[in-house]
Image (cartoon, grey):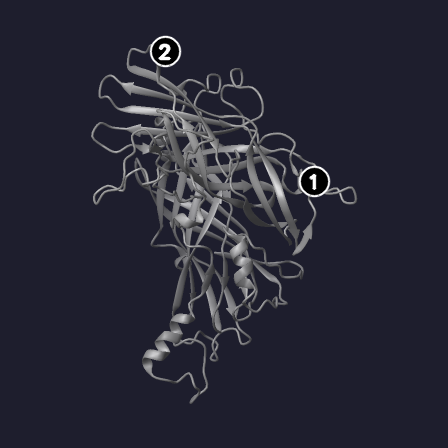
């Protein structure tokens, strides 16, 4: 590991880049916030890993760089800054991906980082992503990602250490033939996840950085005290053993990020049902969707809460002839449904504008036209395996309802919105012109096994990339905020990952049973409330 100090003194800065910055702001308000008046320490570690690829377990090189504070106060939350993860996968990885029909991949990394102070430990997840990366014609594949890093606070005195652990790399293949991107055969199969573990000969067992915490830094003897922060003999801390163990548990390093994988309570999501204004038909479905949308300029993401979607499923039509497959095309249409409006519920996101000013915005995504869902199913005549490619095209503007900068409300006015819809590069622009968001998902099913990936009926993950247009109508006559929002937010390269839950088929509902969770509640709402994924 190589540790580099800043060449010249500069103020220590704490940047909140957690999955939920709003949660960090609330928690940080309960902690001492006096910044450490010391220089930052810049670290760069080059570590050997072993990755499980389809072709076998192979060595890989991982470089991790970040900026940590030189020292932190007890209970003071800080965020490692400038975190970058670079993975060099061997040439065999390229062969594995090209064999799956990929020409490029979109990588996302999840690095488990052990955080320890004295004998107490915690784990933080450092996430990273980047845009599409073309596969090289020969040699290794190098992937560089940046992204969300949770804040950490030491509970007592003593060194706080950060150690690299397991690494997962999600590789989403891109189109194969740019000259013919509408051909289903030109779209690579679903994502590949590569799990990597730290090699046994890794230097310093993967140590990334050490941050002394407390006025005295390490323990009184110059090294961490095995029983927690040092105490004077006869102090009140010298109570019974069980009370001491309880207090020791309280000193675990605090990782300020929400617990993943927890579905919201039904009371916390909007209703999702048909009504007199929206009567169902024989092909009506409803479902909840949720997810995250990156804001590239702000190096963070907005959480899209569970939103109701009403869907009218189309009837399959026979597609073009193929000697090896039966092909069926289905066109369905859908609308968001929130309080009789075609929009998401309002959602709040907090970012650091220009890397230092906390900005909290309340927003909605609002439809300006119908949401179209195009699905093409290809059934193999040899083994009846099916592969379904789905494209969701949605004209959506982003409307800003409220805005606060550093706690000060700004009047955005009643008409603050993007000039046009969020825009993606459509794989078939001749047939689908105009501004709209495009999300893609692929589902596969083998006879006798559950479906994997995305299917309209069972749900799954859809992803895409969008350009956020310039803003208009923001502010008042006395203060025009269009330029501020456009400069801070608008631009290309914003990744979106959406999760749709199992649909409820209104005409033939399936209710929960002791052995089956079912598809519908008793009042014909979607039974499943999906969990957002990064």
Nearest the eye: 362 or 204: 362
Q: Residue 167, position in %: x, y?
A: 39, 48
- Please indicate, yes or no, whether residue 264 appears anywhere in the rendered image: no
Residue at the spot of label 1: 474
Q: Quadrant of the rendered structure where residue 400 is?
A: top right
- Please indicate, yes or no, whether residue 410 appears anywhere in the rendered image: yes
Which comes before the other along the chain, label 1 or label 2?
Answer: 2
| Residue at the bottom extreme, as displayed | 234
Q: Are marks 1 and 2 in contact (CB under 8 Å)?
A: no
Count of marks, rendered view: 2
Question: The residue tagged with tag 1: helix, strand or loop?
Answer: loop
For label 1, the crowd category at 10 Å Cα-Cα, with few meaning under 14, some 14 to 19 and many 20 or more, is many
Tag of residue 320? 2
Would you say 157 lies left or right of 511 here? right
Q: Residue 513, position in %: x, y?
A: 23, 42
Q: Residue at x 70, y 40 (%)?
A: 474
Spatial separation of the CA atoms under disc 1 and disc 2: 48 Å
Would you say 459 lies left or right of 291 here? left
Nearest the eye: 480 or 7: 480
Q: Quadrant of the C terminus?
A: top left
Question: The residue tagged with tag 2: helix, strand or loop?
Answer: loop
| Residue at the front extreme, as displayed | 276
Q: Residue 223, position in %: x, y?
A: 45, 74
Nearest the eye: 267 or 246: 267
- 61 above or below 278? below
């Amino acid at each position: 590991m190589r540790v580099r100090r800043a060449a010249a003194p500069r103020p220590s800065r704490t940047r909140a880049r957690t999955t939920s910055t709003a949660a960090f702001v609330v928690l940080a308000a309960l902690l001492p916030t006096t910044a450490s008046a010391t220089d930052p320490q810049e670290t760069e570690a080059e570590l050997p890993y072993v990755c499980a690829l389809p072709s076998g377990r192979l060595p890989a090189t991982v470089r991790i760089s970040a900026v940590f504070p030189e020292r932190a106060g007890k209970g003071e939350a800080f965020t490692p800054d400038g975190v970058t993860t670079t993975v060099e996968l061997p040439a065999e990885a390229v062969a594995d991906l090209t064999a799956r029909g990929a020409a490029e991949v979109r990588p996302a990394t999840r690095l488990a980082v052990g955080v320890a102070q004295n004998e107490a430990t915690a784990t933080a997840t450092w996430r990273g992503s980047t845009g599409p990366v073309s596969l090289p014609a020969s040699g290794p594949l190098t992937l560089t990602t940046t992204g969300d890093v949770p804040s950490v606070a030491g509970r007592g005195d003593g060194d706080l250490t950060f150690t690299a652990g397991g690494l997962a790399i999600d590789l989403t293949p891109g189109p194969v033939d740019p000259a013919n991107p509408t051909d289903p055969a030109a779209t690579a199969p679903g994502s590949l996840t590569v799990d990597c573990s730290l090699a046994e000969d890794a230097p310093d067992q993967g140590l990334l950085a050490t941050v002394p915490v407390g006025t005295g830094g390490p323990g009184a003897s110059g090294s961490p005290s095995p029983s927690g922060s040092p105490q004077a003999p006869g102090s009140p801390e010298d109570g019974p053993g069980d009370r001491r163990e309880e207090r020791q548990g309280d000193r675990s390093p605090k990782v300020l990020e929400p617990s993943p994988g927890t579905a919201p309570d039904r009371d916390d999501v909007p209703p999702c049902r048909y009504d007199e204004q929206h009567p169902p038909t024989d092909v009506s479905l409803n479902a909840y969707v949720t997810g995250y949308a990156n804001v590239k300029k702000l190096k963070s993401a907005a959480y899209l809460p569970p939103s109701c979607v009403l869907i009218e499923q189309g009837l399959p039509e026979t597609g073009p002839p193929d000697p090896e497959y039966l092909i069926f095309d289905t066109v369905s249409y859908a609308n968001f449904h929130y309080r009789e409006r075609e929009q998401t519920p309002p959602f709040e996101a907090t970012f650091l504008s220009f890397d230092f000013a906390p900005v909290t915005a309340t927003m909605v995504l609002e439809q300006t036209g119908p949401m179209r869902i195009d699905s093409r199913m290809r059934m193999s005549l040899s083994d009846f395996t099916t592969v379904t490619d789905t494209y969701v095209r949605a004209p959506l503007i982003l409307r800003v309802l409220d805005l606060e900068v550093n706690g000060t409300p700004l009047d955005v006015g009643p008409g603050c919105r993007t000039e046009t819809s969020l825009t993606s590069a459509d794989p078939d622009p001749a047939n689908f012109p105009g501004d709209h968001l495009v999300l893609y998902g692929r589902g596969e099913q083998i006879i006798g096994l559950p479906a994997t990936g995305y299917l309209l009926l069972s749900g799954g993950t859809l992803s895409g990339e969008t350009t956020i247009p310039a803003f208009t109508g923001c502010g008042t006559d006395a203060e025009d905020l269009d330029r501020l929002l456009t400069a801070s937010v608008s631009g290309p390269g914003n990744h979106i990952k959406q999760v749709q839950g199992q649909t409820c088929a209104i005409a033939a509902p399936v209710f929960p049973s002791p052995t089956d969770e079912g598809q519908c509640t008793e009042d014909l709402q979607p039974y499943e409330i999906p969990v957002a994924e990064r």
